[in-house]
Amino acid sequence: MIAEIGHYALVLALLLAFIQGVLPIAGVRLRDNALAGTGEPLAIAQFCFVALSFAALTACYVTSDFSVFNVFQNSHSAMPLLYKFTSVWGNHEGSMLLWVLILAFFGALVALFGGNLPAALRASVLGVQAWIAISFLLFVLLTSNPFVRLAPAPFEGRDLNPLLQDIGLALHPPFLYLGYVGFSIAFAFAVAALIEGRIDAAWARWVRPWTLAAWIFLTLGIALGSYWAYYELGWGGWWFWDPVENASFLPWLSGTALLHSAVVMEKREALKVWTILLAILTFSLSLVGTFLVRSGVLTSVHAFATDPARGVFILTILIVFIGGALALYAWRAPLLRQGGVFAPISREGALVFNNLFLTVACATVFIGTLYPLALEALTGDKISVGAPFFNATFIPLALPLLFAMPFGPLLAWKRGDLYGAAQRLIAAFAIAILVGAATAALTKGGAILAPFAIGLAVFVMAGALTDVVERAQLFRQPWPVAWRRLVGLPRSAFGTALAHFALGVTLIGIVCESYFTAERISTIRPGDTVAISGYEISFDGLVARQGPNYREVSGKLIVRRNGDVVGMLTPGKRTFPARGNSTSEAALLTRGFSQIYVSLGDPNPDGSAAMRIYHKPMVLLIWLGALLMAGGGLLSLSDRRLRVGAPKPAKKTALQPAQ
Amino acid sequence: MKALRFLLVVVGLCAALPALAVQPDEILPDPALEHRARELSRQLRCMVCQNQSIDDSDAPLARDLRLLVRERLTAGDSDRQVLEFLTARYGDFVLLNPRFSAQTALLWLMPAVVFGAGAVAAFVFLRRQRGGRGTSAGEAAGASLSAQERKRLDDLLKPGA
């Protein structure tokens, strides 16, 4: 019964979405305010029904109702409760339902918090959003229905893929989807603006918080996924340039470009046409990502061709939305009037530079990801495009961008003074050189590029601090004045500085992990000690234990530094009888920002075991940087200036004459 | 005792499972040669995995390839010869770093082309944006003035006006 309620609620949500796709837009056309105003209650109702449907599927999972095919395939009665919740989206059908839920959630948010938008724009945005919802609701209902029943009902489920039985599954997909799907709002705003043929700085102000929110979620989602892969896959890699990862990285790159170009548009009314295009492209890339991951095209072009129903459906959605939006763009964009002019050396110019490098980097990753698919589809030849290609093409594009980053915020709008900015960055540059030289001295004989990269990262960080120092005029004004200036700075200024600083932090983590990781691969007998980067790790032997739905054998290792015990590591290997496969559970010991990472290989009959032991210096900075970046985004988001036209009821009532 | 027996069963089970990426018994005694082997392994794809290098992969095929790479290196092959040997056997699919050829020319050139096109577009855009500064932009701005505006400008600029 619960499954049927869920299915029925989804059908009702689809009908509501149809109405929401027609009435508000018709209202705008006919200048009928009542009709245009139907968008909000419809969006909220649609969200409620999708949420009901999602709750129904969750209920099926929690109660282990194996008469539902989807639950049978992806759950097991002995699985811990948390994983019963998370396995709702640990499969194709459920994850598409989550996608639709988040889409409806954003629609409801616009309905609830879009009060400061002009009624016509709000109606158009909700109308466009409804069409996206219609296509994906249809996709779920027609090709990926999670509520299909199974008769007779089996006694036990097939269990969730063991790799997914992790807290990572609870966090990574929801955050990633909040990011992916969040960009649909920016897309809807762009299409609504094109339909109306009118766009101004206020539009950029409205669209920025939504883009920023999506970007924050996507940043966190990617970082969570990266950390999850790092500890779950067992060889300590954190980024593989895998097509699935690239699929999430593409909208991040263009979304980052969008955030920056929207600033120009808001402040200076320039780059309008470009910003609209980026808004369309960013969500298009989210759709491309969904297509790549959900159609099965990545496993093999042939797998896609043999069972094409889903792939072709998403491909059609892709073509309709991207093609439609771009056609609308080609038709209406020339109507948009260009705004303020500026010199090449200016804040605007710096942001154009930023956009150039970010979009080209995005295009490079896009080409590298899709090229082998296209080649195989066209000629049948199989080639691989892996990490070496992406490193060779992406890094040269990232370096100039990173170097230019500290300069941008120091340049004035309209016409900047590059020489002046360089002068103000001298301290940052000096610190960078010092740290780079120190790194070179400390790691003598090591990688030649590492000190330069560390220096660049420090330059980025010091440059971000310079921005705040300059704005507050610290060291120039007397302390009380500078302090007041510092406190008075808008939060978005701190947000920018923090996010830029964070990129430097991530870079340090990446460089240290790539160049200074120490590795020991050996077969260790109980009682043996392995030395790595100043630590002595001794092996105490293997222990077996029974988990809720798996058996585990784990090694016990004691970590010492200068003879003192600093921690214990218990890397394990788990075997899941339901599916007959196993996972290796790496053990991590965190020391400051560095980690010791051990993964257990095959235990031998004599009690010894193959082990990979790593010392990864500063590796946590990679994800700490991503967290700080998201924090910078949050700071900007909380800036009052982004909540334009926010009603101030207290003042208004005070001004009203007494009755 | 019971625990020990259970342990043995588990150990026996695990031994049948796929091995961990690089195995201790694969490592070459010569560190320089081993280093080259690792570098090469990172550029070679495990063909039964989804986008994993043989250095990272647990698959038995990856192990075979790792051993093959080390065998060739011990036999005195250069890095290039090893890659050529493997490509001859398994095709271009085995290379994670695609070689420049007629097939991949587009792949390797596109980033540069996109960057070039983007840079030219940005340059043209920025020049047009100069707005009144520089000669060409100044002339363009002057041309857009109506006759009346031009007269008024001339009046204003006239000394002593």
Image (cartoon, coloured by chain):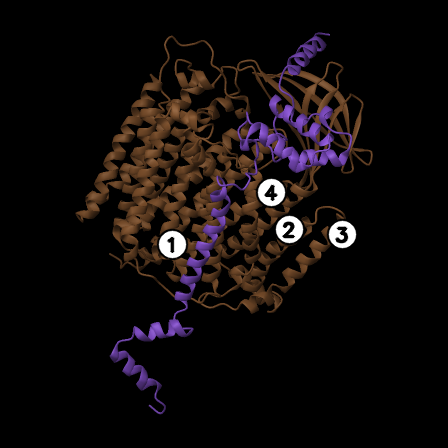
On the image, numbered disc 3 is attached to which residue?
Answer: A441
Residue B13's tag is: none
Q: How crowded is mark 4: few (under 14 residues within 10 Å), some or many (20 or more)?
A: many
Rounded to the nearest whole Å, what is the CA distance between mark 4 and mark 1? 31 Å
**In-front residue for pair A574/A449:** A449
Rounded to the nearest whole Å, what is the CA distance between mark 4 and mark 3? 24 Å
On the image, numbered disc 1 is attached to which residue?
Answer: A274
Say which chain tag 3 marks.
A
Residue B29 in picture, x, y percent from top left: 78, 30
Q: Which residue is painted at 20% across and 45% down in the image?
A: A27
Is residue A644 something that shows in the picture? no
Which mark sits nearer the N-terminus, 4 or 1? 1
**Nearer the camera: disc 4 or disc 2:** 2
Residue A155 in picture, x, y percent from top left: 45, 9
In purple, which chain?
B
Question: Do the dots labelled 1 and 3 sit on one chain?
Answer: yes
Q: Is mark 1 on a helix, strand or loop?
A: helix
Residue A622's tag is: 4
Residue A594 in picture, x, y percent from top left: 68, 40
On the image, numbered disc 2 is attached to which residue?
Answer: A453
Question: Do the dots labelled 4 and 1 sit on one chain?
Answer: yes
Q: In this view, does B161 lie to the left or right of A560?
A: left
Chain A representation colour: brown
